[in-house]
Structures are given as C-alpha cells and as structure tokens.
Image: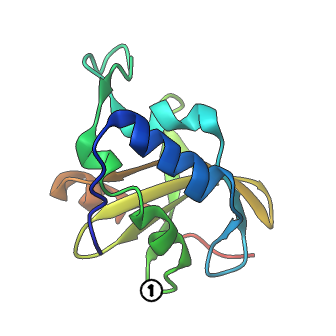
C-alpha cells in the first residue's frame, strides 16, 4: 500500500472530502460507508492529552495513510472484529473494526443499518493494540 504524500494539512483535508465524502465507498460485502466532513479531525488528529481526548494535534502518520481506508474496506482478506466501547467497557455490536496485516492498519465504522455505516476513524495500530483487537469476537456479516 502506498503512502499519500501531500504538502499541507489543508491538502489532506481536501483529499478526504473529495475522495471519501464526495464518493460512494462500499465494503467488500456491500455495506455503503458514509464519510462526513466533521469526522476529519477525529480520524486524522491525535490527542495531546489522552485523558481529555482533545484531538488537538494533526497526525501526519494517520493522514499519509488516508488512501488505505478504501483499500482496507474493499479487501475481502481483511480481518473483521466487533469493536470495543472504551466508555462502557464492553463490545459494541454496531462497531465494526477492520484490520489488515502486516501493516496493522485499522479502520473503524459504525453500523447504521445492515447495509449502511458511518466512518469513525482509521489509524496504524501498534503491535499491542493490534493484538487486543484480534482478541475481540469476529464480526459476522448478516
């Protein structure tokens, strides 16, 4: 998978809007994934303070992998798990987490209906995070 090399933070945002918000993206199993402009900061910024979850720092590491999101969603070989709700401390059956090896790149979507979902975030996971994700129950397409 290739790295996206843009010059400015604004160019990354414009790419996200053009390539994701303005297009129809489907998973390999036919789920339409909706991308919203207001998710940009959540997906491509990191928190200076993880307790506050402030999302105040632009993450070039996340942004330059932005073009991987579609690839992961469309890859029938990606691993798919039920997502963890860290606030409720339990698995959330509407949260679908895809991870692809060997990059350990993660894409999280939230199911709205059986055939429609909302993009939440995407990031390169550490070995430890990827291991935790792989301990979750497998996602079952319905």
Give the x, y percent position of residue 11: 41, 42
SS for callout 1 = loop
Residue 102 visible to an observer of this rendering = yes
Q: Please determine whether, in this image, residue 124 is positioned above or below residue 79.
A: above
**Residue, x 24% and y 47% (percent of image)?**
61
Give the x, y percent position of residue 30: 72, 78
Give the x, y percent position of residue 110: 64, 50
Name the side, left or right, on which 13 lies relative to 24.
left
**Along the viewing direction, whichever of 72 and 38 lies nearer the viewer:** 38
Q: Please determine whether, in this image, residue 72 is positioned above or below residue 128.
A: below
Name the side, left or right, on which 119 lies relative to 97.
right
Query: What residue did someone put label 1 on?
Result: 77
Q: Please determine whether, in this image, residue 118 is positioned above or below residue 139.
A: above
**Residue, x 44% and y 78% (percent of image)?**
78
Dot 1: few (<14), some (14–19), or many (≥20) neighbours within 10 Å? few
Give the x, y percent position of residue 15: 49, 50
Q: Please determine whether, in this image, residue 74 is positioned above or below residue 120.
A: below
Q: In the picture, which quadrant includes the C terminus?
A: bottom right
Q: Quadrant of residue 55?
A: top left
Q: Quadrant of residue 127?
A: bottom left
Q: Number of callouts in the render?
A: 1
Q: In the picture, which quadrant includes the N terminus?
A: bottom left
Q: How is the image coloured?
A: rainbow
**Along the viewing direction, whichever of 46 and 18 lies nearer the viewer:** 18
Residue 86 visible to an observer of this rendering = no
**Along the viewing direction, whichever of 112 and 56 lies nearer the viewer:** 56
């Amino acid at each position: 998978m290739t790295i996206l090399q843009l010059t400015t933070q604004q160019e990354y945002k414009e790419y996200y809007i053009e390539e994701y918000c303005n297009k129809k993206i489907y998973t390999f199993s036919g789920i339409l994934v909706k991308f919203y402009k207001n998710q940009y900061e959540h997906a491509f910024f990191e928190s200076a303070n993880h307790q506050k979850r402030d999302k105040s720092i632009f993450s070039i590491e996340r942004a330059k992998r932005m073009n991987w999101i579609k690839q992961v969603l469309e890859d029938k070989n990606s691993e798919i798990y039920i997502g963890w709700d860290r606030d409720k401390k339990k698995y959330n059956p509407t949260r679908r987490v895809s991870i692809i090896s060997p990059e350990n790149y993660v894409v999280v979507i939230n199911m709205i209906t059986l055939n429609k979902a909302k993009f939440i975030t995407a990031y390169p996971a550490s070995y430890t995070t990827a291991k935790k994700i792989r301990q979750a129950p497998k996602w079952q397409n319905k």
